Amino acid sequence: MNKKITLSLALLSFIFSANAQDSVNDEIDNAIKYGRYDVAKKELYKLVRSQPTQGKHFYRLGLIHLNENNQDSASYYFKQGLRGVKNVDINNLGLGKIGLLTQKDKEAKSKFNAATLNIGPKDYQTYLDIAHAYTYAPKPDFDLALEFVNKALFLELEA
């Protein structure tokens, strides 16, 4: 009986922590959406300290710095994210965006290739983000952007 109670409590604890994590992510998403970067950064700094192996937190922090035109800090967080264990490839997407912004097209292409190397069957958003980066680069490449939109569409249709 004690084992059942302990197992039930452990399961409930896991469920509540997952819901709390979702709540924090929703709060961060809303803060970013409405340009409240200071709020989002505060929460992401906490997540980076508590979950240093989760690459996506570093990516989101890097994106905020990129949105604030702080490429050095963005690059720092994207590179830190590559040291993680989970969701690290997305940080190559961020480094590719910086490559395009600094007109290092070969470097950007290499980073985008690395970002899509282990892409999941339902992760069409990465392709759309690359297409967006090519569209809004200082030297836009609409042909490459369209190529990535088509890849996203194909991936979505396969799912």
Image: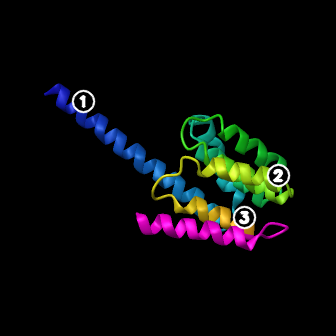
**At 68% across and 69% down in the image, what residue appears?**
145
Q: Which residue is mark 2?
A: 71
Q: How is the image coloured?
A: rainbow
Where residue 104 appears, as percent x and y from the top left, is 84, 54
Classify residue 63 as left or right of residue 150: right
Q: What separation in Å lies between label 2 and label 3 (alpha carbons)?
A: 15 Å
Residue 38 drawn at (x, y percent): 71, 55
Residue 151 painted magenta: yes
Q: Which mark is residue 6?
A: 1
**Which residue in the protein does label 3 denote?**
133
The mark closer to the camera, 2 or 3, is 3
Residue type marked 3 = Ala
| Nearer to me, 76 or 41 | 76
Q: Residue at x 59, y 52 (%)?
A: 116
The front one of 4 and 133 is 133
Dot 1: element = helix
Answer above or below: position of 37 versus 83: below
Numbered range of the magenta stretch? 135-159
Q: Which one is nearer the viewer's eye here, 108 or 61? A: 108
Looking at the image, tell me whether mark 1 or mark 2 is earlier in sequence order: 1
Residue type (three-letter) at the residue carrying disc 1: Thr
Instruction: Please report the residue visible at 18 percent of the width from the left and 31 percent of the height from the top.
Output: 4
- Residue furthest to the left in view is 1
